[in-house]
Image: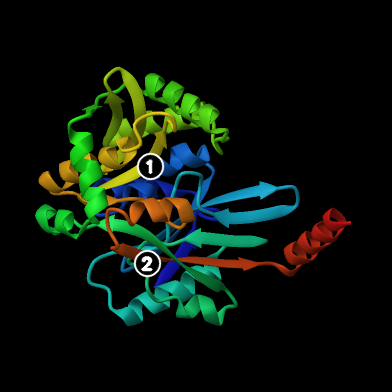
Amino acid sequence: MECFCSIQEPTSKEAYKKLCQMEPNIPIFMRDWYLDCTTHDNWEIIIAIESDKIIAVFPFKYRRKGSFKFIENPRLTPRLGIWYTNGLTDKKKRKINHEIINTLPNFDRFKIAFSYDFTDWQEYYEKGFQQTTRYSYFVDRSEKLQELYAKLDRKVRYCINRAKNEIVIQDNIDVNKYLKAQDDSYRIRGKRKSYSNEFVYNLIKQVEAYAEVRILFAYDKDQLCAINCQFVDDDNKCIYNMFTSYFPTTNANAQLYLIWNSIEWANTNGYSFDFEGSMIPEVASFNRKITENKKMYFEISKTSRRFDYITHLKNIIHFK
C-alpha cells in the first residue's frame, strides 16, 4: 500500500475532488467543496492507495500561527476523520491508520474530532495521542415518530401541543434576513458569535450550491421567537442542526417546538436528525428534553513538547 500527502504531491487534492464526485457516502463536512469554504482552501489531505485505487482519505485543516503548526477541524466542521472505502477489513484499516500517522506533516498541535464510524484509535494511542469521548444527540430515521413522542416527558408534550396552536413556522427564509435575526438574538442575550456573518453567509451559499439548506423562523403572531439553520445531506439521509438562536423575552416554547417540528419533517421525509454541539451543558440539557439517544465520537489530540513548554510559560506569566 502506498500513502502520499498533498503537501508533497499536489495532485492528491484533485484526486480527492474526483473521489467526492463518485462517492455519495462521503459526509458533507468532509467534502472538498465544504473544506474549500471553511478553510479558505487551506486544507491538506492524506490519501491511501492500493492497486491504483483510493481506499482511504484523511482531510484536515493545516495552518500556521507564528512558529506553530496546527492540524485541526475547520470552524463549523463538527467532525472530520478518515473515510474508508467499503469492504475494508479491520486489519486493513489498522494498517491505513498506521500509515496515515506516519505521513502526517510536522505539527505542534493535532486536534481532530473524528466521525461516528471511527471507533478504533489503537494506533494513535501507541503513537502518544490522547482521546476524549464526545457525544451528539441524534434521532435516527428508523425511529417511529409516535414512539419518540410517547417517550417525551409529559410537560414537554404539553409545551409542544400548546405551541402548535401558538407558533407558526416559516421556511425558505433569505440568508441575509437570517443573519440579521441571529445578530439581534445574540445582542439581546449579551452573547458574542465566534464567527463572522461573512463566513456564515459564504458557507450557507456554498452548501446551497451542492446540497440543501433549511432556514426556519418561528413566530408567535408577528413576533419572531426562534430561528434555525440546517444542512441537509441527501446522500447520507441526515439533517445537521447547525445554528439555533432564540429571543428570551418571547414565547418560551418556540425553540422547543421549532426543533420538534424539524424532527417531524426529517422523519416524515426519511432523514435522521443530528442535533450537533451537544456537549455544551445547557445545550445537552435542552436536547435531552426530546431524546436521550446520542452518538459517540472521538476527539484525538497530541501536542509537541515545544508547544506544551511555551503554553506553560504563558500560563505562568498570565497567572502572575
Q: Crowding at label 2, few (<14), some or many (≥20) Cα neighbours within 10 Å? A: some
| Quadrant position of the C terminus in the picture | bottom right
Q: Secondary structure at mark 1?
A: strand
As displayed, is residue 161 above or below residue 122? above
Percent position of residue 266, x then y: 18, 45
Q: Residue at x 56, y 60 (%)?
A: 111
Percent position of residue 175, x then y: 37, 23
Residue farthest right in this picture: 320
Q: Residue at x 31, y 46 (%)?
A: 240
When asked about the image quadrant of residue 234, the answer is top left
Residue 201: mark = none
As displayed, is residue 106 above or below residue 165? below
Q: Residue at x 13, y 53 (%)?
A: 145
Q: Nearer the viewer, residue 47 or 213?
A: 213
Q: Is residue 100 left or right of residue 162?
A: right
Residue under label 2: 296
Percent position of residue 28, x then y: 33, 47
